[in-house]
Amino acid sequence: MANTRIAMKEFYNTHPKILVAVDSIIFGFNENDLELKLLLLKRKFEPSKGEWSLMGGFVNPNESLDDAAKRIVLQLTGIEDVYMEQLYAFGDPVRDPGGRIISVAYFSLIKIKEYDRELVKKHGASWIALSELPDLIFDHDEMVEKALRKLRIRARTQPIGFELLPEKFTIPQLQRLYEAIYQKPFDKRNFRRKVLAMGLLDKLDEKEKETSKKGAFYYKFNTEKYEELFQKGVNFEL
């Protein structure tokens, strides 16, 4: 095996080197907000120093793409075990003025309340609402657009929206999340009827009374029930 690796190394040395990077589209949500947010930072080095950018980095020699993406999210937010999905490979030869770089984009979902504020501050990053996004460097705007389209597809067929909510939440909070993802309003009565008809939410005795005197009951997402229905071929359709 060692000899094979040496031979391959010698063979590949005759080819030009291309750098591989990972860029992270990190979506966040606070259950009492009305908009989905994106974690962006001001680039601290050239090219495009001082401009808005996604968090990214080069893949280390002994690191997989997935591990590189996890490392980047951890370094920026301090959070592990987040929902993460590989999005797309961006390989235009002139996409980065710094060199020939292929970037594999990932999108992640995190609860804004759980991130490490000191780490984000250290990197000069900020949470920015989707309606207020600035122009981003290189092809990062395209990355965000593709990630948002994929997020909407996933949210329509899978319960990934719950990755952005606390363990217990109200129906109004859940509706605000899906309205933020799709950037359009839903009819309250129809939304409530639809999500409860799935049988995937467990109603709690506790009420949320911070935003109204009457209060709304809290619910929890039943992961085991979803897995059971998924194995039977029942899809999450909202």
Image (cartoon, rainbow, N blue to C red):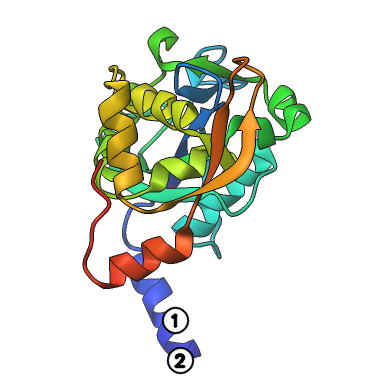
Q: Quadrant of the C terminus?
A: top left
The image position of residue 47, as x and y in percent, is 49, 20
The image position of residue 5, as x and y in percent, is 44, 81
Q: Secondary structure at mark 2?
A: loop
Please, what is the three-letter code of the amino acid marked with disc 1?
Arg
* Residue drawn at (38%, 61%) of the image: 226
What is the CA distance from the residue labelled 2 to the residue labelled 1? 6 Å
In screen coordinates, is 85 left or right of 184? right
- Callout 1 crowding tier (Cα within 10 Å): few <14, some 14–19, many ≥20: few
Q: State whether residue 91 appears in this view.
A: no
In screen coordinates, is 61 left or right of 227? right
- Callout 2 crowding tier (Cα within 10 Å): few <14, some 14–19, many ≥20: few
Q: From this viewpoint, which residue is outermost toward the right?
A: 118
Q: Nearer the viewer, residue 183 or 41?
A: 183
Q: Nearer the viewer, residue 54 or 224?
A: 224
* Residue drawn at (62%, 32%) of the image: 207
> Where is mark 2, residue-wise?
1
* Residue drawn at (39%, 28%) of the image: 175
The image position of residue 193, as x and y in percent, is 29, 36
Q: Nearer the viewer, residue 71 or 39?
A: 39
Q: Secondary structure at mark 1?
A: helix
Q: Nearer the viewer, residue 133 or 47?
A: 133
Please, what is the three-letter code of the amino acid marked with disc 2?
Met
> Where is mark 1, residue-wise?
5
Q: State whether residue 208 appears in this view.
A: yes
Above or below, 88 against 119 in this view is: below
Look at the numbered discs 2 and 1 and tell me whether their residues touch, using CB distance below 8 Å: yes
Above or below, 61 against 197 in this view is: below
